[in-house]
């Protein structure tokens, strides 16, 4: 009986040592100018129930499959087009995106999202892009609040914003947005690259777009839903799932997760390789890629451009211990690229290189 009592105490103590506590987000957990992250756009055809959340919850998305890779860059607002001047004044950081806005009425490319980031809030001040090559800045009449700091479990925030602009060659575009954010869960999140302590936020944005052309006025109402899993000191969501709800039906439109270097809060689940290095960097016509493998493995070596396009792909076999791969870069034009090592579609490590 005494031994059983001691064993129970030991189990309780062990559980207490490993128990999570909910994280609290502040402005230091969000990306500032000059930061870049490798991201994966995953297949949105997944089994997902947005109601599965709560305290000390475990989300497992380890089986996500890749559609494309890209790089998310955060820049100083003043590094964007000077025609976006009014967005500069209202914003602290701009995010360069690779996705376009495409609907039945309008197509906007080369998009930057602009954000206010200080010790009180993280909010969207507007966005900008090009229509047929013509720059178009769109400043919200009020910032759309995404997080108020400190941001903790069970916090709820709301905001109302929108814009009313003239679109060259088209007509008018008026948008009204009402956003509700709820931190509805905390716990651990597993993606194909690791496990994180996270705070989950569900945002529901009720949107009414009204397009006008001559005497015609076309309203279109829908609801966008965003699920974000944020970890401490990671700059952007570890995972974000976007969906749209039309006539009561919610459909997933995008699944995006962050990959790259391991930082505090991540437990790397694939310990097959370590110490990925690239030399020389910046590179000219060739580069040497070195890494350490804990056992013999088959890998894929990818070289992608800054937009995530695959330029070079090699299947390699690494031996237990130190490995060195010599790669010809003569086919690459000057610019920034990413060398990524994967195993069975899972990311192992990534390094940025500059081709001179």
Image (cartoon, helix red, strand yellow):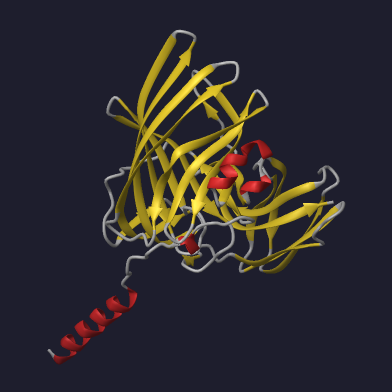
Above or below, comparing residue 282 to residue 16 in the picture: above
Can residue 58 be seen from the camera position used here?
Answer: yes
Q: How many marks?
A: 0
Q: Kindly indicate the quadrant of the structure image that contains residue 179.
A: top left
Seen at 68% across and 39% down, the residue is 82
Can residue 44 be seen from the camera position used here?
Answer: no
Q: Give the left or right position of residue 82, taking residue 222 as reference.
A: right
Extreme residue in the left direction: 1
Seen at 28% across and 77% down, the residue is 16
Expressed as whole percent of the image width and height from the top left, the position of residue 221 reads 35, 24
Q: Quadrant of the N terminus?
A: bottom left
Q: Nearer the viewer, residue 59 or 99?
A: 99
Above or below, comparing residue 307 to residue 185 in the picture: above
Q: Give the left or right position of residue 70, taking residue 21 as reference.
A: right
Expressed as whole percent of the image width and height from the top left, the position of residue 105 reads 50, 18
Q: Nearer the viewer, residue 272 or 135?
A: 135
Q: Give the left or right position of residue 239, taking residue 260 as reference.
A: left
Seen at 45% across and 61% down, the residue is 119
Q: Nearer the viewer, residue 104 or 80?
A: 80
Q: Nearer the viewer, residue 113 or 99?
A: 113
Expressed as whole percent of the image width and height from the top left, the position of residue 321 reads 68, 70
Expressed as whole percent of the image width and height from the top left, the position of residue 143 reads 44, 44
Extreme residue in the top direction: 215
Above or below, comparing residue 97 to residue 31 in the picture: above
Seen at 15% across and 91% down, the residue is 2
């Amino acid at each position: 009986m005494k031994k059983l009592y001691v064993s129970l105490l030991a189990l309780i103590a062990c559980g207490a040592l490993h128990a999570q506590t909910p994280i609290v987000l502040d402005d230091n957990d969000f990306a500032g100018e000059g930061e870049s992250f490798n991201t994966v756009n995953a297949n949105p055809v997944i089994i997902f129930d947005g109601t599965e959340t709560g305290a000390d919850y475990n989300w497992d998305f380890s089986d996500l499959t890749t559609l494309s890779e890209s790089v998310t860059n955060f820049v100083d607002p003043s590094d964007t087009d000077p025609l976006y001047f009014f967005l500069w004044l209202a914003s602290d950081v701009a995010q360069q995106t690779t996705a376009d806005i495409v609907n039945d009425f309008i197509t906007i490319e080369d998009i930057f999202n602009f954000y206010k980031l200080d010790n009180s809030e993280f909010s969207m001040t507007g966005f900008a892009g090009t229509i047929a090559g013509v720059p178009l800045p769109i400043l919200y009449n009020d910032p759309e609040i995404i997080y108020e700091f400190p941001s903790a479990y069970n916090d709820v925030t709301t905001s109302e914003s929108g814009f009313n602009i003239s679109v060259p060659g088209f007509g008018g575009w008026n948008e009204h947005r009402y956003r509700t954010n709820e931190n509805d869960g905390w716990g651990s999140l597993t993606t194909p690259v690791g496990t994180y302590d996270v705070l989950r936020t569900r945002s529901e944005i009720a949107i009414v777009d009204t397009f006008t052309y001559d005497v015609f006025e076309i309203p279109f109402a829908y609801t966008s839903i965003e699920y974000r899993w944020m970890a401490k000191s990671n700059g952007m969501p570890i995972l974000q799932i976007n969906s749209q709800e039309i006539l009561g039906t919610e459909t997933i439109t995008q699944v995006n997760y962050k990959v790259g270097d391991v930082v505090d809060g991540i437990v790397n689940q694939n310990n097959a390789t370590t110490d990925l290095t690239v030399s020389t960097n910046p590179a000219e016509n060739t580069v040497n890629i070195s890494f350490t493998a804990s056992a013999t493995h088959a890998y894929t070596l990818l070289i992608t451009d800054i937009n995530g396009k695959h330029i070079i792909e090699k299947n390699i076999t690494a031996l237990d211990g130190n490995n060195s791969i010599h790669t010809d870069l003569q086919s690459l034009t000057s610019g920034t690229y990413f060398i990524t090592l994967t195993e069975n579609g899972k990311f192992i490590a990534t390094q940025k290189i500059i081709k001179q």
